Amino acid sequence: MAALLEINGLDKSFGEQRVLRNINLEVERGEIFAIMGPSGAGKTTLLRILNLLEKPDTGSITLDGDTINGVQRNGRTATRQRISMVFQSPALFNDTVYNNVAYSLRVRRMDKHAIESKVSQSLALVGLEGYDNRWAKTLSGGEEQRIAFARAVVFEPDLLLLDEPTANLDPANVAKIEEVIRTINRELNTTIIIATHHMNQVRRLADRVGMLLGGELIETGRREVVFGGAADERTRAFIEGEMVC
Ligand SMILES: Nc1ncnc2c1ncn2[C@@H]1O[C@H](COP(=O)(O)OP(=O)(O)O)[C@@H](O)[C@H]1O
Ligand SMILES: [Mg+2]
């Protein structure tokens, strides 16, 4: 079976600066793929392109065989309904937890009872059942991020993009979020791409990894293989914490 996501020959510049260079990558259905790399490597830009927030200059991206860059307006909407993203900061609406999580289902005009049931399933998935009527701004940082996950997966996207989702959290909440990521992957079989520079997190979560450096994907492989002995010296240095980031 073909990969869920295929990226071929993708380039992106901001002005004179080439931020992504000839990215080629396949991500299989159901896997957790970690994009590792120091700050400035281009991780966020790559995820934003996949989430259609940014356009690549050249190259192609397909999701389940459908081209997702360069698509017409309607196609773009259809694609957006299959991908979602969680950012470093949750940025919830100033509203109840229920309304935050229900939002994307209302946009899809799902019926009220179906929405109620999907929202409770989603809250249970992140371990915050019963939080429906809580006001988003009364939550702790860790709880807010778990609601951001509930909001991102409530419509069961094919692909979930995570951009350093634990960067602002303390270790206890990092562990909870990692558990949420594993639960989503296991129970919904969601394909996940996570950008992170925390090697222990990669070790705990990823099936496969890619090392992004200076906009180039210099190495990809199964996590245990790359962590067991990276082919590229720079990947090895990064994994061992010898690279400044
Ligand atoms: N909108 C933008 N305009 C100009 N430069 C940008 C923009 N977004 C990112 N960059 C630059 O692209 C490079 C990669 O950034 P980013 O994708 O955020 O890397 P990472 O997430 O790995 O830290 C950086 O040098 C950054 O300054
Ligand atoms: Mg980033």
Image (spheres, grey):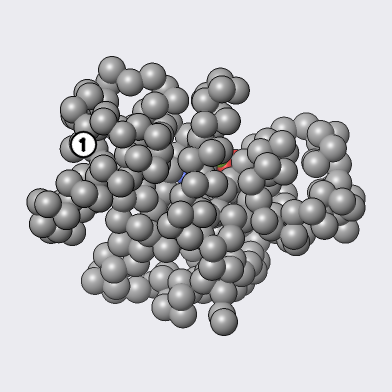
Instruction: Bin the neighbour count of mark 1 within 10 Å (Cα to Cα): few under 14, some 14-19, many 20 and up.
Output: many
| Residue displayed at 55% across by 59% down | 12
Identified at 56% across, 29% down, the residue is 174
**Foreground residue among 220 and 44:** 220
Left or right: residue 169 compared with residue 92: right
Res 20 → quadrant: bottom right
In which of the image's four quarters is ligand 2 placed?
Answer: top right
Whether residue 112 is visible to the viewer of this picture, yes or no, is yes
- From the viewer's perspective, is 102 left or right of 30? left
Relative image position of residue 224 (x, y in whole percent): 79, 53
Name the quadrant of the N terminus.
Answer: bottom right
**Front in this rendered view, residue 197 or 21:** 197
Question: Relative to 33, does residue 41 appear above or below in the rendering?
Answer: above
Residue behind label 1 places its C-beta within 8 angstroms of ligand 2: no
Q: Give the position of the C terminus as an image quadrant.
A: top right
Look at the image and tell me whether residue 17 can be seen. no
Compare residues 168 and 55 and report the one nearer the observer: 168
The residue positioned 37% from the left and 28% from the top of the image is 144
Instruction: Count the labels in the image.
Output: 1
Residue 72: percent from left, percent from top = 29, 73
In the image, residue 188 above or below residue 92: below
